[in-house]
């Protein structure tokens, strides 16, 4: 049976925490709230965009840091039946909580010797190279197993998978073993750049493999690829980031619902005069007399250090600019805009919210939403809302 993480009494990321979430949460500097209803809404939106394909869910890296158990369970409840992880170990953990009708695909394939683990947990390995192919076919035929697997071809990204020139050799190896891969996949290098000619090229190259693998299902698109149109959907699409609210359409409004809210706790508030230098390197100076709040979220919590004098925390509708450098465990925030009604130590400020989301922070930090997302979560109290 699926683990149901919807209540804040269950906290899969902190299984040893006491059941009284509020008391335990008080001991944390940051609170991460993950909206599983938004994940499910995003899944439905992607399914609408790819009506002829199966929509899988990519939950590698602990569902991009949001908790693979909670996220996969929510996706399962929404009808998702195929899940992608990167490592065998991630697949084994996921299998422990997903029903047997869920398919779990391991993108990196089996490291040598882990073929029995794949078989025991009914994980479908993606075979990316000749060594993995040979070991998997040998293991399967020797043990009289069906050898269910996926195969990846490199259609232009030069990262994972067989060269197209090896397609004949791969097909022959499968034919000799009397096994057919259930899924044939490739990955787009430039899907977030709709006009890039590499997209078409990769799609057409994948298409040429249909004749060699007539009984296999095909898959190319991840989050952004879904928005390139039906020609890119093949039989199965593999979104990750878009499920978690990251904008799959760079530079245009985000069609996905935000999933993550991050709040930081105010540890201390001080009144300071104008021209007060703040933080490491005394890299910022107050312009006028104000109140400053020290908030317990820093770069060790995944808040990027590169946002010097950018970004803001929020108190309701009011942005409160960050002042100076991000420390390991804290940032300093200017409360000048709320001087009439100051918050108090212990109160929470929004760090990521509807006003300022993952992609905004990523832009201010000079990175992508994926990196922001996958670095969150290790140190926060997590609450799941359904
Ligand atoms: C991570 C990954 C995905 C999901 O990508 P998103 O851009 O997060 O949707 C899909 N396929 C492969 C091969 C991946 O490595």
Image (cartoon, rainbow, N blue to C red):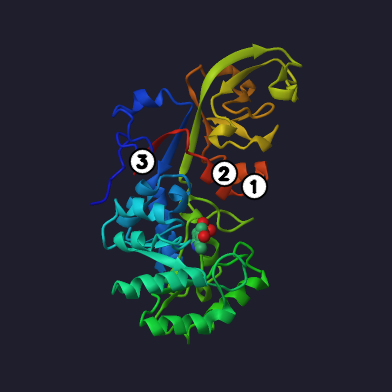
Label disc, if present, on residue 78 of the rendered structure: none
The verdict on label 3 being within 8 Å of ligand 1 is no
Q: Are marks 1 and 2 in contact (CB under 8 Å)?
A: yes
How far from the left and from the top, in percent, is residue 66?
44, 44
Residue 281 horizontal side relative to residue 127, left or right: right
Residue appearing at x 36%, y 79% in the figure? 179
In depth, the one of 354 and 183 nearer the eye is 183
Quadrant location of the C terminus in the rendered image: top left
- Nearest to N terminus: mark 3 or mark 2: 2
Disc 3 and disc 2 in contact, CB within 8 angstroms: no
| Gap in angstroms between the C-alphas marked 1 and 2 | 8 Å
Q: Which residue is mark 2?
A: 372
Find residue 367 and name its label: 1
The single residue placed furthest to the left in the displayed view is: 1
Q: Secondary structure at mark 1?
A: loop
The residue that appears at 49% across and 31% down in the rendered structure is: 263
Q: Nearer the viewer, mark 1 or mark 3?
A: 1
Give the image quarter of residue 218: bottom left
Q: Is residue 48 above or below residue 178?
A: above
* Labelled disc at residue 385: 3
**Could you say whether the residue bearing mark 3 is in a helix, strand or loop?**
strand
Residue 165 rendering spot, x and y as whole percentages? 59, 81
Q: For the residues carrying marks 3 and 2, which lies nearer the camera in this image?
A: 2
> Can the viewer see residue 204 in this picture?
no
Q: Residues within 10 Å of mark 2 (few under 14, many from 20)?
A: many
How far from the left and from the top, in percent, is residue 103?
34, 63
Q: Which badge, 1 or 2, is on the more N-terminal residue?
A: 1
Q: Is residue 140 above or below residue 45?
A: below
Q: Are marks 1 and 3 in contact (CB under 8 Å)?
A: no
């Amino acid at each position: 049976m699926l683990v149901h993480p919807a209540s804040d009494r269950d906290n899969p990321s902190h299984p040893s925490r006491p059941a009284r979430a509020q008391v335990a949460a008080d001991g944390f500097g940051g609170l991460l709230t993950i909206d599983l209803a938004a994940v499910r809404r995003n899944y439905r939106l992607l399914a609408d965009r790819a009506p002829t394909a199966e929509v899988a869910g990519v939950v590698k890296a602990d569902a991009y840091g949001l908790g693979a158990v909670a996220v996969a369970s929510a996706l399962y409840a929404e009808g998702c039946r195929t899940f992608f992880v990167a490592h065998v170990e991630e697949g084994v953990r996921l299998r422990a909580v997903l029903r047997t009708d869920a398919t779990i695909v391991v993108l990196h394939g089996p490291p040598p010797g882990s073929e029995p683990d794949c078989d025991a947990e009914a994980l479908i390995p993606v075979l990316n190279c000749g060594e993995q192919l040979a070991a998997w076919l040998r293991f399967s035929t020797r043990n009289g197993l069906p050898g269910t697997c996926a195969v990846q071809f490199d259609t232009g990204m030069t990262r994972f998978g067989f060269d197209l020139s090896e397609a004949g050799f791969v097909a022959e190896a499968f034919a000799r073993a009397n096994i057919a891969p259930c899924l044939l996949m490739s990955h787009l290098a430039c899907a977030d750049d709709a006009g890039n000619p590499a997209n078409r090229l990769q799609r057409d190259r994948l298409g040429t493999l249909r004749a060699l693998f007539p009984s296999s299902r095909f898959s190319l698109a991840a989050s952004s690829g879904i928005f390139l149109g039906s020609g890119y959907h093949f039989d199965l699409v593999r979104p990750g980031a878009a499920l978690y609210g990251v904008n799959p359409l760079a530079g245009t409004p985000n069609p996905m619902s935000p999933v993550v809210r991050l709040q930081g706790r105010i540890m201390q508030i001080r009144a300071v005069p104008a021209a007060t230098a703040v933080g490491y390197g005394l890299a910022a100076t107050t312009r006028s007399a104000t109140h400053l709040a020290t908030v317990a979220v820093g770069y060790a919590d995944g808040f990027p250090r590169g946002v010097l004098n950018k970004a803001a925390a929020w108190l309701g509708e009011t942005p409160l600019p960050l002042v100076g450098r991000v420390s390991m465990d804290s940032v300093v925030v200017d409360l000048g805009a709320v001087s009439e009604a100051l918050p108090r130590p212990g109160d929470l400020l929004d760090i990521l919210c509807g006003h300022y989301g993952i992609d905004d922070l990523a832009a201010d930090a000079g990175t992508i939403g994926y990196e922001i997302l996958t670095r969150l979560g290790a140190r926060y109290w997590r609450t799941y809302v359904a």
